[in-house]
Amino acid sequence: MNYRWDWSVLFKDTYMGWLWNGLLWTVIISLASWAVALTVGVLIGIARSAPSRSARLLAGLYIDVFRNIPPLVQLFLWYFVLPEVVPDAFGLWLKRDLPYPEAVTAVVAIGLFAGARVAEQVRAGIEAVGAPLMPAALATGLRPVQAFRLIALPLGLRAIVGPLTSEFLITVKLSSLSLTIGVLELTAQSRHVENYTFQGFEVFTFATIGYLVIGLCVTGLMRFIDLKIGGAALRKAPA
Amino acid sequence: MIVIEDLHKSYGNQQILCGCSATVNLGEVVVVCGPSGSGKSTLIKCINGLVPFERGAITVDGVSVSSPKTDLPALRSRIGMVFQSFELYPHMTALQNVSLAQIHVLKRSRAEADARSEKILARVGLGDKRDSRPSQLSGGQQQRVSIARALAMDPQAMLFDEPTSALDPEMINEVLEVMQELALEGMTMMVVTHEMGFAQRVADRVLFMDRGQIVEDTPTAQFFTAPASERAKQFLTKVLTH
């Protein structure tokens, strides 16, 4: 192979600045969309476990819609289509006045997609680990809402920290989609530097290691939380 | 105290209870026994409204369980229940398990509830286990925590749904001893169990169930010496021969 390796591009002021800036945006988009995903996922997951039929149906509809449309399509819908179909004033605000419009749209789109997946985990956790203790909690005189809030929900959430690791990791990787609407995150900046230097291997090695380190941090963090709250024991079938 | 009248319950096409009637008076200990699938557990779970029923009536201390006007949580808080598989909250310590409903149902302060929980845990022989999680306790210890959780609510009656069936043989006695003490103190109790020795020692009356019906409702001594029904005789020869 006739390739002239030149690792020094990674350390040239301009390029290094672009790459680290991209890494920073990847971290920001990942954390922000994960925050959206967790909030939406827990709320929808609770609604999915509610006694009210209509709440369950609505939550199910949300999950079906957001989980089945490709996240890239969702991103385009939010970014290109939404501003055209809402009332003019709001559309104009989205296009002109919203600060960091690409990044905010990416966070919302990725967050809502991942939220649907988190919601299913929350529902499963409540159903498998939390709900079986409801009769015992009710028998002590707790009202159904209290029993759910004090027992079924916290148990369900503890049980899913392990499985949520994968969802968190997927969210991190989905952040790279945001380059399609113009967010200069890690993948976008890597291509950017490649275009200027033609040193694609070095640049994408940097990106690869960047994603790997973020992923390992996420895995470590989630494992730590899981250990702290005894999630693994809850996932085991009772003896 | 507990009055059951003409109770009917079915799951789909399966008739579980057909026309059960019984009474448990204040201070009485009634043991419910019978072959598996005879409806014992369903019957006892109907009493605090954990299982809804189609026909008949249950009143506890004069309050109807099935009436929509009844405050079911308030009624349940006055009846303690102990389950076959303990059903402790695995993310809480023994003390927190016992204190939870005191704080959220009886509105005791945490300090007050914990003080009461410690007393009751000591009473069931687990004073040193207050900070243990259920997973760190043996089956017998877990079941005693579960009894403590029910007692902490100062119940007027206690329901036991096969409290020793999930236990290793050597742990059965530590649970039965606690139950026996309760009975001696005059607690009104309804106990679904296969422990015939316990029934003989403690029960005032025995209800024998078969295929969803209460076949026999007799004083303990008479049940073990001269059961009226053929079905009960067969059952007794099977369970008493070993």
Image: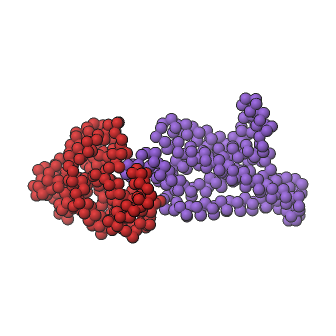
| Residue A186 visible to the viewer | no
B143 shown above or below B219: below
B219 shown above or below B17: below
| Residue B52 visible to the viewer | yes
- The answer to which quarter of the image holds residue A198 is bottom right
Pick whichever, A120 or B234, lies toward us.
A120
Q: Position of residue A187 (x, y in %)?
A: 78, 53
* Shade representing chain A: purple
Q: Position of residue B128 (x, y in %)?
A: 39, 70
User: As drawn, which residue projects farthest toward the top?
Assistant: A87
For residue A239, side relative to residue A30 (left or right) = left
Residue, x 31% and y 53% (percent of image)? B155
Pick whichever, A109 or A174, lies toward us.
A109
- The answer to which quarter of the image holds residue B167 is bottom left
For residue B48, side relative to residue A22 (left or right) = left
Say which chain is red: B
A141 shown above or below B85: above
- The answer to which quarter of the image holds residue B97 is bottom left
Q: Position of residue A57 (x, y in %)?
A: 52, 37
Residue, x 46% and y 40% (percent of image)? A51
Q: Position of residue A214 (x, y in %)?
A: 70, 60
The quadrant of the rendering that contains the C terminus of chain B is: bottom left
Pick whichever, B138 or B151, lies toward us.
B151
Residue, x 69% and y 44% (percent of image)? A108
